[in-house]
Image (cartoon, helix red, strand yellow):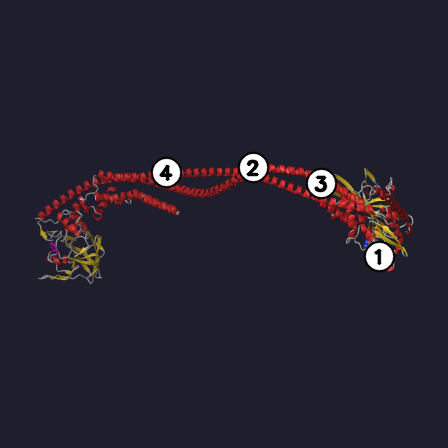
Amino acid sequence: MNTNYHDDNGDEVDSMLCIPFSRLIKSGFIITKCSDNTVLFVNVGGEAVKEEGNCAISVVADRFFDGGDVLRTDERIIDAGDMPAIYQSARFGNFSYRFSNLSPGEYFVDLQFAEIVNINGPKGMRVFDVFIQEEKVVSALDIYSIVGANKPLQVVDIRVSVGLDGVVVIRFQGVCGSPVVNGICIKQASRVPDQEEHEYVICSNCDTEIEISSCQKQNIRIKSTAKLERKIEELKNLCQLKSEECYQAWMSLTAANEQLEKVRMELDNKYFQNLRLDQAMGKQAAKLKDISSRYEYDKKHWLASIRELERKVETMKQEHSQLSSEAHNCADSIPELNKMIFGVQALVAQCEDLKLKFSEEQAKRKKLYNQMQEAKGNIRVFCRCRPLSKEETSAGYATVVDFSAAKDGDLGILTGGSAKKIFKFDRVYTPKDNQADVFEDASPMVVSVLDGYNVCIFAYGQTGTGKTFTMEGTEQSRGVNYRTLEQLFKVVEERKETFTYNISVSVLEVYNEQIRDLLATAPASKRLEIRQASEGFHHVPGIVEAKVENIKEVWDVLLAGSNARAVGSNNVNEHSSRSHCMLCILVRAKNLINGECTKSKLWLVDLAGSERLAKTEVQGERLKEAQNINRSLSALGDVISALATKSNHIPYRNSKITHLLQDSIGGDSKTLMFVQVSPSEQDLGETLSSLNFASRVRGIELAPAKKQVDANEHQKFRLMVDKLKQELRSKDDALRKLEENLHTAEAKAKDKDQLCRNQQEKLSEVEVQLASKTELSRQLEKQVLRLSRGMKEKDEICSKFQLKVQEPENKLKDREHTASMTLQHKEQSTYSSEKLQVTPNMVSVLKAEKDSPNIRSLSSTTRTINVESELLKGTDSLRELRRKKQIQSKGSENSFNSFLLSAPLVDKRVPSAESNKARQIDPSKAFSRITRSGTKSVTTGQRAFSDNNFNRDQVRGGKESSSRLKMWLR
Ligand code: ADP
Ligand code: MG
C-alpha cells in the first residue's frame, strides 16, 4: 500500500494547525466527503454554485465578510475536486467573516485555499494566521510552500464552539503578505473524530480513508517509532552540536562585544577629545578672528596715520625747501644786509653826530632861552589887581586904579583929585584877567626849572588882595601852583624821549621866623634849619619831599599842605595871612642823550600880608608876628634891591624866607613877583606901599630917567631878540628833522635785525620739527613692521593649531576606520570560521540575546551617548558640533549598525540550502514562483537572500530557536 499520509515536512505542516484533529488536505473539495450536516458553504469572492445530481450542498455567494478585496482567475486549478469554481475566486487583504444565527453547539469549520496565480491581485508571498472566535486555529499558513501554485488546499475539521449568541467569527491576519481564502464551510459536529478507533488511516493527499490490517498497523507503528527515535537521536546530536556552536559563537560575541565596548569607549573618548579640540579650535578661531579684525583695524588706522604722516612729511619737505630757499635768499641777502648794517652804522654815527649837535644845539637853545629870559629880566614883576569886593561896592568905595595903559604894563593910581601916579611893571592884570591869563605869562619861567634853572614865584601884597587866590586859586579856577605843576608834567611828557624827570614837592610855612613842614605827619622833634648842601644849593634837612608822578598826586599834596596851614585869628584876616606859605618843587632831571643830570628848584611863595603894622590893633604875640612879617618882607625887598643894584653883598640871611630862597633869587635864577593890589580907595595907602615895593624889586624907579629907555638901543635889542628867536626856531626845526631821521633809521635797522633774527629762529625751528617728524615716521614704520611681523606669527600659530587639530581628527578618523575595518574583518572571520554553518536558529539566538547583559550594555552605551548629547544640548554650537560629529561618525555608526545587522546578515548570507530544503521547492514551483512575482530578472537564488525570505525563515524558526536557546542556557 502506498499510503503516504506523512511526508517529510509533515511535522512542519502540522505545526501550522493549532486545533487538535484539524487536518490539511492537499486536494480539492470532494462532494462525497461532505457529510449531510453542512450548515453553510460560502464561495468566497464568488457567486453561488449549484451542483447537479443528488448533492444537497448549496454553495452560497460571498457574504458575511468584513473588509478585504475579491480576486478571480480563469486559470485551471489542478486537482480541484468536484467544485473547481470555488478555487477560482478568493478574498484577500485583512478581512474577517461573521456568521450569525447559528444554533449553539459544536461545529467544524473547513477552509478552502488555493495559491492562484495570473490574477489581478497582489503578487508575492502570503503567509497568514487564521483566528476563529479570536482563537488562532491556523498559524503562519503558506499555501504555496505546501501545495505550490494553482493547487487547492483544505484545512478541515477545525472544531469550534458556538455560544448562545449563535455567532462564529473567522478572522484572517497576514504575517507576511496578505491572507487569501477561497471558501468557508461550516458543519454541525455530530461526533468527535477518533482515528484511534478506526481501523483505517486517512490519506493526507486525498483524504481517503484507507483500511489497514492490525499487522500492518503494528508494522507502521514500529517503523514510525524507530524512525522517530532515530530522528530524536539525530536531533539530540544536532542540538548538542548547535549548543556548542552557540556557546562558541556566544563567547566570540562576548569578546567582540567587549572589544566593541572598548572601541566604543575609545570612540567616545576620541569624540570628546575631538569635541574639546573643536571647542579649543573654535576659541582659537574666534581669538584669531578677533586678532585679525584688530589687526585689520590697526592696519587701517596705521595706514591712515602713515598716509597722514607722509602727507605731513611731504608738506614739511615743501616747507623745508621753501625755507631753505628763503634761507638761501637770506644768505644771499647777507651782503646786502652787511651793506645795510654799514648803512645803519653810518646812520648811527651820523646819529651820534647829530646827537652831539643836538645836545650842543639844545645847550645853545637853553642858553638862548635863558638869554631871552634874561633879556626879559631875571626878575620880573607882574601886577594884579583884584575886582572890588561886594562889600566895597556896597560901601561905596571908589576905584583908584587906572588900567588904561595896562597893556603896556603901566598902572595908574589916582592918588587924589586928578593926580595920578604911574607904576611900570612887566605885566599888569586887570580884574577881568583870569587865572589862565595870569599863568600864560608865568609859564615860560616855570619851564626853566626843567632846564635846570632855579625859579622863584611869589605873591606880595596886602591881605585880601588875592595872593592866595593867585597862587593857590580855587577848585574851579586853579592858581599858579597847580597850573605850574600841570605845565611841568606836560613838558615832562613831551620830553620823555630825551629826559627823565624826578619831581618831588615840599610844603613849608614860615611863621614868626620859624620853618614848619606842612607835609609832616608828626610835629618835628627839633627846629627845622636851613643848610647849604653844596655850592648854590640850600635845603632843610628832615623836610618831607613828597614824590609826585602825576597831577592827581600834586593836588592831594597841595590840599594836605593847605589843610595843615596854621590858622590864627585876628580881625584883619585869617592866620594864613600872617605866615608865608612856601611850596618847593624839586626837579631832578637826566638828559638821556648826554647823561647830564641837573637838580633845580621852583619856589612858589604865598607871602604874608604886607599891610603896615599900624593898622593892626594887636599886642604881644600878634605884634611880634606882624613885626616878623614886616622884617622878612623888608629883607626880601632888600635882597631884591641888592640884586638889582648888583651889590656885592646880598643880605639873604636877614630873614628865614630870603635864606630859604637864597639859591632861587639872583644869579641864573628867575624870579617872578606878583604884586597884588586892591582897587579900593580905602586901601590906597597900602596899595601905594605895595606898588612902591614892587617897583623897587623890579629895579626900575618911577623916575623918568630910568623909565625912559634909549629908543635905538631898544630897537636894536628887539631886533636881536627877533633874530635870536628866528634862529632858535630854525634850529629847532633842523633838530626835529634830524631826530626824525635818526628815529626812522633806527627803526629800519631794528626791523631788519628783527626780520633776520625771526627768519633764523624759524629756520632752526623748522629744522628741529623736520628732524622730529622724520624720527616719528621712522618709528611708525618700525611699529607697522613689528605689527605685521606679529600678525605673521599669529597666522603661523593658527595654522599650526589647525594642523594640530587636524592631526587628532585624522587619527580619530583612522581609528574609526580601523575599528570599522576590524569589525568587518571580525565579522568576516566569524563567518569564515563558522564556514557558513550558521543557521537561521543562530539569528534567533542573537535575537534572544538582545536582552542579554552584553547587548544591554551596548544599548546602554548608546543611551549614555544620548544622555551626553542631551547634556551637550546646552549650546547651539555644541549641538552643531555634535551634528557634524554625527555626520562624521555616521560611517562608524553604520559600521556598528552593520554589525547589529550582521546577525540577520548571517542568516541572509547563509545559503538557504536548509530553508530550501525546508520549503522543498521543486524547479517547477520555483519557476511558477518567478512568474507569480512577475520579476523577470530575479533568480530563485537571489530571492532567497531577500529580507522577506529572511522574515519567512525567522518566523518559521522562531518557536524552535527559542526552545533551543532555553535548552542551551540550561
Ligand atoms: P590874600 O591872600 O591876599 O589875603 P585872598 O586871596 O584871600 O587875599 O583874597 C581875598 C578875597 O578876594 C577872596 O575872597 C578872593 O576870592 C578875592 N579875590 C582876590 N583876587 C581876586 C580876583 N582877581 N578876582 C576875583 N576875586 C578875587
Ligand atoms: Mg592869603
* Residue 11 pos. (x, y %): 17, 48
* Residue 554 pos. (x, y %): 76, 47
Going by the image, does 280 lie left or right of 848? Answer: right
Residue matched to label 1: 389
Going by the image, does 203 lie left or right of 476? Answer: left
Residue matched to label 4: 803
SS assignment at label 1: loop
* Circle 4 or circle 3, nearest the eye: 3
- At 73% across and 41% down in the image, what residue appears? 361
Residue matched to label 2: 331
Ranked by sequence position, the earlier of labels 1 and 2 is: 2
Ranked by sequence position, the earlier of labels 1 and 4 is: 1
* Circle 1 or circle 2, nearest the eye: 2
* Circle 1 or circle 4, nearest the eye: 1
Instruction: For the C terminus, give its image quadrant.
Output: top left
Front in this rendered view, residue 137 or 587: 587
Which of the 4 image quadrants contains residue 679?
Answer: bottom right
Q: Tell me if the residue at label 1 has its CB under 8 Å from ligand 1.
A: yes
Q: Tell me if the residue at label 3 has its CB under 8 Å from ligand 1.
A: no
Q: Relative to 114, does residue 844 appear above or below in the rendering?
A: above
Question: From which residue to which does the magenta span run?
Answer: 75-80
Tell me if mark 1 has few (under 14), some (14-19) or many (20+) residues whose alpha carbon lies within 10 angstroms of its own: some
Tell me, for residue 358, which label it has, or none: 3
